[in-house]
Image: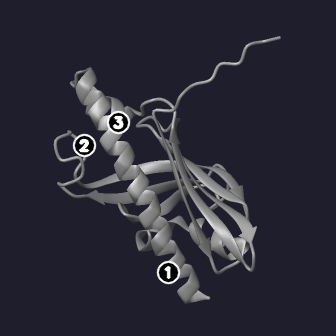
Amino acid sequence: MAETETTTPLFESQAEIVVDATPDEVYALVSDLPRCREWSTECTGGEWISGRPGAAGAVFRGHNVRGEDVVAWAPVVRGVWTTESQVHTAIPGVEFSWAMRDSRGNAQSSVWAFRMSPEGAGCRLTHHFRMDQPTEGIRKITQDMDDDERRRFVTEWGAKVGADLHETLRRLKSIIETER
């Protein structure tokens, strides 16, 4: 019998909310990444740069902004910056996920997902984030930190991401239920 290796992710967080809409209605919105400025805490929009928009393999360039107060002691990117991500899963009414790409265009183990499941007359929407290994950006942020600073950063960044997931879902619920 072969042993299986399990890894503990560097970051993993999720949030859930029940929305008064069908899984297909929710999917139609969350897979429309150029609209993410309406619900994201950092992404201010963006555009599809390759592939069929919203389809597995398509690449999205996101425009982002982060304030000075976010993990203020750490050397994180502040102000305006862009990212590229590639759609990983695109199953209408079920799941939409994407992986952040590095500066060479390779997918990293930084995956964001929306999952939908029917619940009563509506839908349970789950927003999930998982990073198994440090991304190119996280390695740059932590390269000059000692072990205690790295642990502190992981704890504080993880809390920030968790809060962002909840806020994103709160905003999405409002948009979806208003547009119905």
Residue type pointed to by label 3: Val
Residue 5 percent location from the top left of the image: 65, 19
Question: Residue visible at 63% across and 61% down?
Answer: 54
Q: Is 80 placed left or right of 47 in the picture?
A: left
Of marks 1 and 3, which one's residue comes earlier in the chain? 3
Of marks 2 and 3, which one's residue comes earlier in the chain? 2
User: Where 179 falls versus 72 (above or below)?
Assistant: below
Label 3 SS: helix
Residue assigned mark 3: 154
- Is residue 140 among what the camera can see? no
Residue 131 percent location from the top left of the image: 49, 38
Question: Residue visible at 35% across and 35% down?
Answer: 138
For the residues labelled 1 and 2, the Cα–Cα distance comes to 30 Å
The picture quadrant where one finds residue 64 is: bottom left
State yes or no: discs 2 and 3 in contact (Cβ < 8 Å).
Answer: no
Question: Residue visible at 21% across and 24% down?
Answer: 144
User: Where 120 falls versus 9 (above or below)?
Assistant: below
Residue assigned mark 2: 76
Question: Residue visible at 36% across and 60% down?
Answer: 63
State yes or no: discs 1 and 3 in contact (Cβ < 8 Å).
Answer: no
Judging depth in this view, the residue of 156 and 48 nearest the camera is 156
For the residues labelled 1 and 3, the Cα–Cα distance comes to 30 Å
Which label belongs to residue 174? 1
Of marks 1 and 2, which one's residue comes earlier in the chain? 2
Residue, far top: 1
Q: Residues within 10 Å of mark 2 (few under 14, many from 20)?
A: some
Label 1 SS: helix
Label 2 SS: loop
The picture quadrant where one finds residue 168 is: bottom left
Residue type pointed to by label 2: Val
Q: Is 108 placed left or right of 40 in the picture?
A: right
